[in-house]
Image: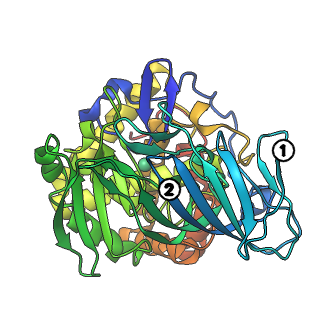
Amino acid sequence: MASLRGSRFVFVALIVASCGGDDASTADSPLPATATPSVPGKSDVATPASTSASRGIVSTDLVLDLTTRTGRATLTLETGSLPPTFEVGDLRIDAVSTSSGTVVGHSRSAEGHLVVDVTSRTTKLIIEYGFSKHGHFDGWDATPGFTFLWPDHCGNLFPCHSAPADGTTFSLEVLGVPEGQTAVYPREVPAAAPAYQLGIAVGPYLYEPLGTTPSGTEVGVYFTSATRAAALTGASRLPEYFAFLEQTLGDYLYGKTVASVAVDWGPGDFGGLEHHPFWHIDDGQIGDPYTHAHEAAHGWFGGAVRMACWEDFVLSEGTSTYLAARAIEAVDGPTAGAALWQVFGTELLEMIETGDDTVAWLPDTCNAISIAEHPLWSLAVYYRGAFFLRAVEAEVGRAALDATLAELYRRHGGASAAGVPDLLDLIEDSTGFDPSDLATLWLLSTGAPPGL
Ligand SMILES: [Zn+2]
C-alpha cells in the first residue's frame, strides 16, 4: 500500500523509528478533532459485503506472461441478475468468452469498467488481455520486477473488483520469466482475499527455509545475494512469530508455505505489503524483525478478515500492529516488546506535536474516500489502533482479548468482511466490557490520550 506525495513515498504496511521516523506519516493535513465523538453501533454504519455494482468474483484464475505481457483470466462469478463488470484499468481486452468457448460481447462503461454482455446464468468467463508496464506503484513494474496493486490498481494487471470487502480466491501461473530470474508468487490463494493481496516478485532470488511451525506451516524468506544477510537477520525468528499468530488466532488460511520476500522499491521507500502467502518487504526494511511480524499478522487481519470499507483501515493496520508487538514480546521477550511500544508512543506523540495526527476511524461513510490520497493513510492510524487494543487488553485481560480476536477471525476469516463495529460489538458481547469510551478516545479523537 503506498501513495505518491510529491517525492515522498511511504508504505502502509509498516512502521518504527528504526525505519525512518521523519517519514512516518502520510497525513498532509490532519482531520479536525471530533468535537463530540460517539461510537456508532453496527446498524448505523453501511458495511456491505460487496461494494461492487456487479456480481461478485468468487475465484480468479490467472495465467500471466511477463514477456509478451498478456494474460488470461478465468473468473468464476456469483449468480445474480446484475451484468458482470470489472475494473480493467489500462488493460487491452482481446477477447471475452464463456467457459464453453462462446465469444461474448463487451464494452467499456463511462467509468472505464469492462461490461460483459452475458446472461444472468453465466457464472464463468474467460478474458484474454494485454497489460502494460507500470513504474509508479500501480501495476506490474518490470524493473526491477514486482507487482504493486494496493489499494485499487488490480485492474492494471487483471480484471478485478478492488473494493476491500470483495474477496476472491486465486490461482496463478507466471510465464515468460527472464533467464536467470525467479518469479516468487503463490500458485494458489485458497481462501478469499482482497484483490490487492495478490503479488509477484521477480529477481535473482534465493530461498532459505527457516523452520516449520507446530501447525505444519513452513516459514522461509526470499532474498537476493545483496539482501541475504539482512533478510536472514530480520527473519531469523519469523517462524516463531508465525507460530504465535497461529496459536493465538487460529489456523492460517493461505497455504502451508509462507515467506517474506525482499523487494527493491527504490530509495526512500520502506515497509511491506501483505501479499500472503509471500508478502513483500522493501530491501531497506528486510532486516527489521518487526516488519516481518507485522506483514505476517496481515495474513489474519487485512487479508483473511477483509476490511468492510477503506474507512475501517484501522481494523487491518491497528490490529496487525498490535499483533506484531505481541508476537515480538512473546518470542523476543518483554524488553523487546516494551521497546516497540515505546517507539509507537514516541512516534505518535511526534505526529500529534507536528500536526500529522488523525482520527483512526471514519464511521459515517463506506468507500467514500480514496485511501491513498486521504489523511487516514497515516501511521497514526496504525498506532492508535494498536494502543486501542492494548487499552482494551488492560480492561478485559489478555486471554479474553485474544479469544475475541480469534473469534472475529473464526467468523470472518476467508469468508466475509468486517468493520470496526464488528470488533467493538464482539468485544462487548464476549467480555461484557463496553469499549465505546476507549474507541472514542483512541479511534475517534485526535490528540494525546492520557497516559500516552
Ligand atoms: Zn500493515
Observer-nearest of 404 and 9: 9
Q: Residue furthest bottom?
A: 215
Is 412 on the left-hand or right-hand side of 250?
A: right
In the rendered image, the quadrant that contains the C terminus is top left
Whole-number angstrom distance, CA of label 1 to CA of label 2: 25 Å
Q: Tell me what residue is drawn at x 29 percent, y 76 percent.
A: 217
Location of residue 331 in the rendering, given as x and y in whole percent from the top left corner: 19, 63
Residue 401, image quadrant: bottom left
Residue 152 in view (yes/no): yes
Residue 417 in view (yes/no): no
> Which of the two marks, 1 or 2, is nearer to us in this view?
2
Q: What label sits on residue 89 in the rendered view?
A: none
**Which class describes the residues within 10 Å of circle 2: few (<14), some (14-19), or many (20+)?**
many
**Which class describes the residues within 10 Å of circle 1: few (<14), some (14-19), or many (20+)?**
few
Location of residue 93 in the rendering, given as x and y in whole percent from the top left corner: 69, 49
- Above or below: residue 275 compared with residue 367: below
* Residue designated by label 2: 64
- Above or below: residue 135 compared with residue 384: above
Q: Tell me what residue is drawn at x 57 percent, y 44 percent.
A: 131
Location of residue 255 in the rendering, given as x and y in whole percent from the top left corner: 39, 74
* Residue designated by label 1: 109
Q: Secondary structure at mark 1?
A: loop
- Above or below: residue 228 compared with residue 134: below
Is 401 on the left-hand or right-hand side of 71?
A: left
Location of residue 414 in the rendering, given as x and y in whole percent from the top left corner: 55, 72
Q: Secondary structure at mark 2?
A: strand
